C-alpha cells in the first residue's frame, strides 16, 4: 500500500520557538494532504486541508497564522507551529489522498516545555 | 462537531472473547471505514464498507453498516492480546468530502 512518512516522529521544543513537521508521500503524488491533531485518548480532529500549489484551507477555530501549512510539491506538505506554547503539545498526524483512500502518516509527538 | 459517536469508549475483554464496537454518525457520509491505532502510533486502515453494503468480512473482522440508522459496528472475533489498541470509525462527509472520525473505542485484550 501507499506510504506516508512524517518527520520528526518526536520533538521537544521550548515555549516561543517554532517547529516544522514534514509529511511526505513516498510512492505516490498527492495533490491534497490533510493535517490532524489528536489529544491524549481523543480522536483525530481535522485542522486543515493542504492543497499543492495553493493556500491551505483551515477548519473553524484553527489559527492559520499559528499553524502554517505549505504544500510546495506533490509529495511534501509541511506544518509549522509558530511561537509554540505548552497547549500546542499534541500528536499531529498527516494524511495524503491517494487514488482510493487517504493514507496516514505515523504521527509526530510535539511537546512544548 | 466533526465527530461521530462511538461506544463503548473503553472495552476490556479476555483473550479469545469477541469484541464489538459501535459507531454512529449524524451527518450523511460515504464509505465508512475502520482504523486501528496503537498507542502513540499512526492509523492503520482495517476495512472499508461502502454505502451500498450492509456487511463485510475480513479475516477476524466483521463490519456492518446501517445507513438508515447511521450506524456501524466492528466485531473482532477470537480476540488476541495484540488486538489491544484504539479503534476509530471514519466516513467521508457527503457535504464537505472530508474524512470525519468517530471518538474511538479503546480496546484492551487481557492475555
Image: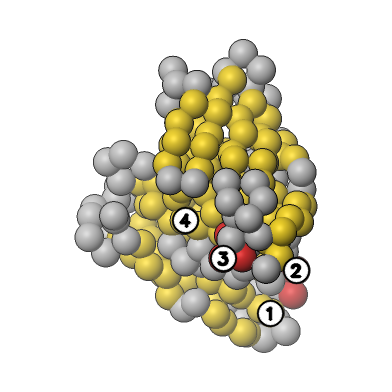
Residue B77: percent from left, percent from top: 57, 46
Q: Chain of mark 3?
A: B
Above or below residue A74? Residue B48 is above
Query: Quick one: quadrant of the C terminus of chain A?
Result: bottom right
- Residue sitting at x 58%, y 46%: B76
Q: Chain of mark 1?
A: A
Q: Nearer the viewer, residue B11 or B27?
A: B11
Q: Is residue A94 visible?
A: yes
Residue A111: percent from left, percent from top: 66, 78
Contact between marks 1 and 2 (CB within 8 A): the answer is yes
Q: Chain of mark 2?
A: A
Tell me the mark number nearer the camera, choosing from 3 and 1. 3
Q: Are marks 2 and 3 on the same chain?
A: no
Q: Are marks 1 and 2 on the same chain?
A: yes
- Gap in Å between the C-alphas at discs 2 and 3? 32 Å
From the viewer's perspective, is A21 left or right of B2? left
Disc ID at residue B82: 3
Disc ID at residue A87: 2
- Residue sitting at x 58%, y 61%: B80
Amino acid at each position: 500500500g501507499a506510504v506516508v512518512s512524517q518527520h520528526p516522529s518526536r520533538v521537544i521544543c521550548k515555549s516561543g520557538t517554532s517547529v516544522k513537521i514534514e509529511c511526505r508521500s513516498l510512492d505516490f503524488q498527492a495533490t491534497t494532504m490533510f493535517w490532524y491533531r489528536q489529544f491524549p485518548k481523543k480522536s483525530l480532529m481535522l485542522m486543515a486541508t493542504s492543497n499543492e500549489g495553493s493556500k491551505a484551507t483551515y477548519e473553524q477555530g484553527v489559527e492559520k497564522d499559528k499553524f502554517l501549512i505549505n504544500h510546495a510539491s506533490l509529495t511534501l506538505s509541511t506544518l509549522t507551529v509558530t511561537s509554540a506554547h505548552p497547549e500546542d503539545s499534541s500528536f499531529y498526524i498527516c494524511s495524503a489522498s491517494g487514488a482510493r483512500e487517504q493514507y496516514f502518516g505515523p504521527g509526530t509527538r510535539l511537546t512544548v516545555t | 462537531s466533526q465527530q461521530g459517536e462511538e461506544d463503548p469508549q473503553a472495552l476490556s475483554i479476555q483473550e479469545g472473547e469477541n469484541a464489538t464496537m459501535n459507531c454512529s454518525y449524524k451527518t450523511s457520509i460515504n464509505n465508512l471505514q475502520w482504523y486501528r491505532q496503537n498507542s502513540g502510533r499512526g492509523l492503520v486502515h482495517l476495512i472499508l464498507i461502502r454505502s451500498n453494503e450492509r456487511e463485510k468480512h475480513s479475516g477476524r473482522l466483521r463490519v456492518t453498516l446501517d445507513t438508515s440508522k447511521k450506524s456501524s459496528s466492528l466485531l473482532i472475533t477470537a480476540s488476541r492480546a495484540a488486538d489491544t489498541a484504539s479503534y476509530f470509525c471514519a466516513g467521508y462527509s457527503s457535504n464537505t468530502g472530508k474524512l470525519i472520525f468517530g471518538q474511538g473505542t479503546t480496546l484492551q485484550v487481557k492475555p
